[in-house]
Image (cartoon, helix red, strand yellow):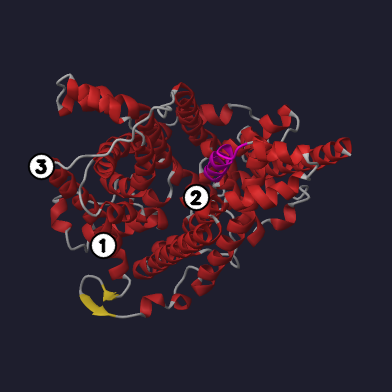
Amino acid sequence: MHSLWHDSNKIILTALSLFLVLSLGIIIFLPLVEILQQSFYDRVGSFVFLDNFVHYMQEPKSLRLLQNSLFIACVSTLIVLPVAFIFAYALMRSSMPLKPLFRYLALIPLLAPSLLPAISFVYLFGNQGFLKSWMGDSSIYGVWGIVMGECFYVFPHVLMILLSALSLCDARLYEAAQSMGANSMKKFMSITLPSAKYGLISAALVSFTLVITDFGVPKVIGGDYAVLATEIYKQVIGQQNFSLGATIGVLLLIPSVITFGVDALMQKKQTSILSAKFVVYKPKKALFFDTTMFLFSLGVIGLLVIILSVSVCASFIKFWPYDLSFVLKHYDFNAMDGGGWDSYFNSLRLAFWSALFGTMLVFMSAYVVEKSKVYALVRILLKFLALLPMAVPGLVLGLGYIFFFNNSLNPLHGIYQSMTILVVCTIAHFFTTSYITAVTTLKQIDTEFDDVSESMGVAFYRTFFRVTVPIAIPSILEIARYFFVNAMTTVSAVVFLYSPQTTLASVAVLNMDDAGDISSATAMASLIVATSIGVTLCFNGISYFCVKSSQKWRRG
């Protein structure tokens, strides 16, 4: 009986593992292989190997684009990293008031498309902006406009990493330093920074990668200051030069792969902080320090809220900045170019299906890797495919989808320019972060549950649905929320794949901005933010209800 149970379980798990490897291979690996292959061919389809790269890098314009992208990424990182670190330090190591509120408000930019901050800066500092005089003889359209927009865009991503890095701190170290007469600066330099150094490195790499691969901010506010991400869009959409687009895509892939590799190496070197004798650090009240941290945090939150509020307010203003009367005409999307109200409902459908199927695919993949006893090689391959999207920019992935799914010889060619390909691409784009969340949760569940089930001859899927899934419900809801919100806000991964029938709200923002309907673009962006906030609150409410009603042991 036990042998029969073992054989049937192994067969089912092996089949599931092979299905997951095949699925991830199709939606992640093969499109990347295709884009690499296309970079070896010229516009007429002749094999030229590395000639595209050689010719492109020999052009003065190419070097300028590379320098521009690196400069934007480095400057934005150098600005946002210390600001986010001080903000995270204030939340974790001070006793200032309103910390929960500040934390929630600081993460709001995650709920907005990257085009929104760029549009807000145009309203503030553009040719007709209220604060145009602050720019002097300079223009917001260019390098500093991009830097400002990117700082708003990447701030919450960097903040989350730094909050995690500063969350664990052994109070005994500070007590020992205090007894030895060390002052606050000495304790900060000798204890705090060393314990957070890997988090700082990881945050810097994430910021650099997000900025160098971002498309939305430079497209709206970049002006004549071109970067690699916008050049791909120009070559593919504007000139239909797919071979050159593939070449630039591979070049854009290189810094992402390098930063991903460095980050993985740093994670391996990180040692455990939490020990059996660990004592949680609780910040003590210090009037001057708490006041300073509060004022700094208030200033940061003030800037974030102002940038977000400008676009929301502008969507209700008749004609900025000449006629500030209240109107709703900018929400009449059917009267504007860009996709109309259908684009918004398309985004809702995309978000729903991405959250549903993405969560299922992610959690099953994490379960097979962490809990199953199938062949080690299969689990290693599945883990590789699950982590691969983190190193792939959205534009590059979307371009790979064009080459792979637009091939008439591909049996899956039928999904090209349909809602299905948008769902598949979105799941692939945001797969890794969700997978890491699921793996982290599954690691916390003792293997004893599975061992007992095996000894009693209970099928693994019964244990999976009756034990594993109920325990992991909060994380599963968080993964679903992550897919939903990112599907609403994504631009880069889907900008090459939509059809007139599947235009998305985030793409409509881009199209309306291109057409000069900036007020309508802000209205659609504001609607995306409002929807994302509403959905986040709903998921939080469902998670709270589930934990309260069926997981009382969590509070035990």
Among all residues in the image, which is located at the extreme top? 180
The residue singled out by tag 3 in the image is 288
Horizontal and vertical percent for residue 225? 33, 44
Q: Give the left or right position of residue 141, taking residue 483 as reference.
A: left
The residue singled out by tag 2 in the image is 554
Q: Which residue is more in the foreground, 94 or 227? A: 94
- Magenta range is 433-446
Horizontal and vertical percent for residue 139? 22, 51
Principal secondary structure, stretch drawn in magenta? helix
Horizontal and vertical percent for residue 390? 52, 38
The residue singled out by tag 1 in the image is 123
Disc 2 on helix, strand or loop? Answer: helix
Residue placed at 38% from the left, 66% from the top? 526
| Cα–Cα gap, marks 2 and 3 | 37 Å
Q: Which residue is more in the foreground, 4 or 250? A: 4
Using the rendered view, name the quadrant where residue 511 is placed: bottom left
Q: Which mark is residue 432?
A: none
Among all residues in the image, which is located at the extreme left? 288
Amino acid type shown at disc 1: Tyr
Q: Which residue is more in the foreground, 316 or 8? A: 8
